[in-house]
Image: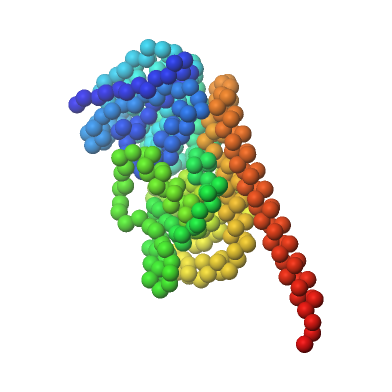
Amino acid sequence: MSVVFNLDAKKNARILLLSLRKIKFHVARCYLYELEDLICQFDSADILTPIFNPDLFKVTNRIANTVAQAVGSSKLINPLFKQVNLDKEYELFFVICQSPLDILTINSIKNWRNKCRKVVVWLDEIWAKDIEKWKVQLSFLQEFDYIFMNFSQSIEEVTKTIQRPCEYIPFGIDAIKFCPYPLNRERSVDLYSVGRRSQVTHQALLDLSERVNFFYIYETIKDLYTTDHRYHRSLYKNILKKSRYFIANRAKIDDTNATGDQQEVGARFFEGAAAGTVMLGVPPECESFTQSFDWEDAVIKVAYDAPNIAEILADLDSQPDRLQKIRTNNVINSLLKHDWVYRWETILATVGLNSTPAMMARKANLQNLAERILTRKNSEERSTHHSDQIHKQERTQMPVA
């Protein structure tokens, strides 16, 4: 039962990250590892990575959390058994917990509170109806300065439970890598669907792909794990950038037992928009969605069960100007609003730390890319308008037979 702690250290690093990338390999975690990678790029960060058998960790983590629940305390219970001592001080300790089950892994760092001036956790997924169940794990976060959460409707109850500042923060995206420009490659995939899906809509799309030249990509296996999160994100973004339509629904739309009818924004919306797809589906009816996607046609509402999906797609295909506007608006807004650098900037400002020069350079790059896309869009519109005017003049000047 050997645990190794790998510390990828930088000289004068001000940030410490705890990453579970060598323990948790499910594809659902890859976008969080993407954020960690970017923090290391545009900030000065050390990343501490426990290395442990992932199958064994499933067992030890389940036992550790069960024991914590039984004794009513999350302190000192460590699913990794071994601890590491920090030998330097940091301005900020930042850890992402996709699930409350991840929280106890912080106990693998013996002196994290003494060595870090500020400590922040990003709590990814916790449904309001489950907060009481996770009360023991959440109590551990009472030692944290700030808790950021992307489930907006769970914030109030978590705040009451742990009596610490909890703030909403949306998902983000590597908007530069997901951006389809400047290559502007052909969108050879007609429709892309990942994750949960309606069997009704899926069957209608399968039927469509059998009848006509329609390229439909979907998942065929369950419980997807990856050997390297970077490979998965690279494949995913490249398929998205070549896709015309993308199905995006509110988080766990088909599992009300898990959500308790709570509606939240999933990562799919940020990924589909950044890649310039036309998103189809059921967005959540909540303020956090309307704030993040406040432009026209960000998502075209289509019922979860859509037996008429072929007719819907045919109608949209008859509106090429509208589709191009949607794609352009999705990309530009993603570049200006949803890159991970904006989320990291928010976190740093909250704890009183300044942005780095690399962050400012990235923001300038995002702005420049958005302006180039907008300039090209305006140029194409003027060219189209000019062509229409010429054709109109030619028609009016034609001699009457």
- Given residues 333 and 287, the one toward you in this image is 333
- At 49% across and 35% down in the image, what residue appears? 149
Q: Is residue 210 left or right of residue 90?
A: left
- At 43% across and 66% down in the image, what residue appears? 214
202, above or below 104, in the image: below
Q: Quadrant of residue 4?
A: top left
395, above or below 372, in the image: below
- At 57% across and 54% down in the image, what residue appears? 327
- Given residues 250 and 65, the one toward you in this image is 250
Image location of residue 79, percent across then percent down:
28, 27
220, above or below 86, in the image: below
Image location of residue 244, percent across then percent down:
50, 58
Q: Which residue, as the protein is rendered here, is positioned at the far bottom? A: 401
Task: Please identify the quadrant where the N terminus is shown.
Answer: top left
340, above or below 49, in the image: below
Q: Quadrant of residue 53?
A: top left
Is residue 22 visible in this depiction of the protein? yes
Number of numbered markers: 0
Image location of residue 233, percent across then percent down:
41, 43
Is residue 291 visible in this depiction of the protein? no
Task: Please identify the quadrant where the C terminus is shown.
Answer: bottom right
Q: Which residue, as the protein is rendered here, is positioned at the far left? A: 1
